[in-house]
Image (cartoon, grey):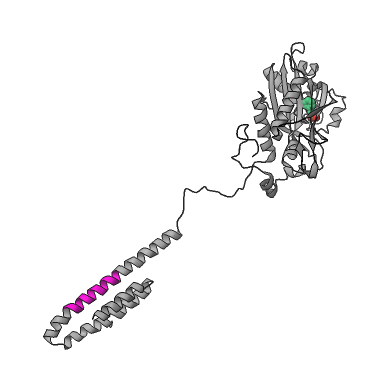
Amino acid sequence: MDDLRQKYLDLIAGVADEAALEDLRVAAVGKKGEISLQMRELGRMTPEERQEAGPRLNALKDEINAALAAKKAGLADAALDERLRAEWLDVTLPARTRRQGTIHPVSQVTEELTAIFADMGFAVAEGPQVESDWFNFDALNIPAEHPTRTEMDTFYMHRDAGDDRPPHVLRTHTSPVQIRAMQANGAPIRVIAPGRVYRADYDQTHTPMFHQVEGLAIDRDLSMANLKWVLEEFCRAYFEVDHVELRFRASHFPFTEPSAEVDLRCSWEGGQLKVGEGDDWMEILGSGMVHPKVLQAAGIDPDQWQGFAFGMGIDRIAMLKYGIPDLRAFFESDLRWLRHYGFAALDQPTLHGGLSR
Ligand code: PHE
């Protein structure tokens, strides 16, 4: 009887699943099980023998049944543990780990330059993209017959036949925001105006819609020296270098006098742009002292106030800083391009935290 007991306890301990355990139960204590058959033998024993063997057999049967029940509970627990492990879900994990959407380089650069100019006391001004020809041209000292009107490849809005008023235009530059900001705020004023502009032109460096940022500062005694300092300061911060060198080239814009186009010293060695060193010059913006007629058009007395303005291509400085070769790709909404050149949504450019990282 001890052998029988040990045999079944060992077998039960070694069983791996509930089906095998059931087979074992049948083999031991089922109707024709080994222990059940032993109990039938009791009938053939003498009363003395039966008195001795009966309780021991019953105890054995109870012990095996208890071992079977314990094992069954153990197997069920293990199965539940396994299922819980397989179906486990960490609800505290971030919902998306893949970086799908990104910040477009134009948005990134707009944030960067806004942070830089805000630090120098410039507020952000806005104007409409569909602009009257007065704001886009006349108020900026570009009269009707001026060649600039045709040079700018202007898109004209529709006018009904018989309506003789000059058509509105898609603004060809952000300069009309100078007029709107001065009309709204008077002087002194210090604003930038980033936004979309439109010209009928299309190749590797031109698209019919692109982005400019206008700068305007009017006060009692501003000069070209202030313009130069602001632009140098901007370029150092924007290109994230310690030293830059700017070259002011005499130029002409109807709305500034004197006017200058500004070049940045750089090197293109190995196809890699380095700002502040080298023998190349790269044009980055147009600028000058605001023309008295422009101040007048905006209701500001040119005998009391003067200042400077500049206009810079946002897409262009984005291409330069981030090594993006083709402007047209900016506006194709190709996800692969956006994943490559885009910026993480939560990396807000700040002067203290770093602009580009
Ligand atoms: N509006 C000019 C352009 O689009 C740039 C500019 C702005 C030049 C302000 C001088 C002053 O080319």
Q: Residue at x 76, y 20 (%)?
A: 225
Q: Is residue 298 above or below residue 130?
A: above
Residues 43 and 298: in front is: 43
Q: Position of residue 32 (x, y in %)?
A: 28, 83
Q: Position of residue 84 (x, y in %)?
A: 42, 59
Q: Position of residue 49 (x, y in %)?
A: 14, 85
Residues 152 and 328: in front is: 328
Residue 44 at least partly seen: yes
| The image quarter in which residue 210 lies | top right
Q: Which residues are magenta?
A: 55-69
Give the number of callouts.
Answer: 0
Magenta run includes residue 64: yes
Q: Where is ligand 1, by quadrant?
A: top right
Q: Residue at x 86, y 31 (%)?
A: 151
Quadrant of the drawing holding the C terminus: top right
Magenta run includes residue 88: no
Q: Position of residue 220 (x, y in %)?
A: 72, 13
Q: Residue at x 32, y 66 (%)?
A: 73
Q: Residue at x 36, y 71 (%)?
A: 18
Residues 181 and 10: in front is: 10
| The image quarter in which residue 124 lies | top right
Residue 127 at least partly seen: no
| The image quarter in which residue 322 lies | top right
Tell me if 12 is positioned left or right of 330 in this view.
Answer: left
Q: Return the residue found at the far left.
A: 48
Q: Please, what is the dominant secondary structure of the magenta stretch? A: helix
Q: Is residue 288 above or below residue 60?
A: above
Quadrant of the drawing holding the N terminus: bottom left
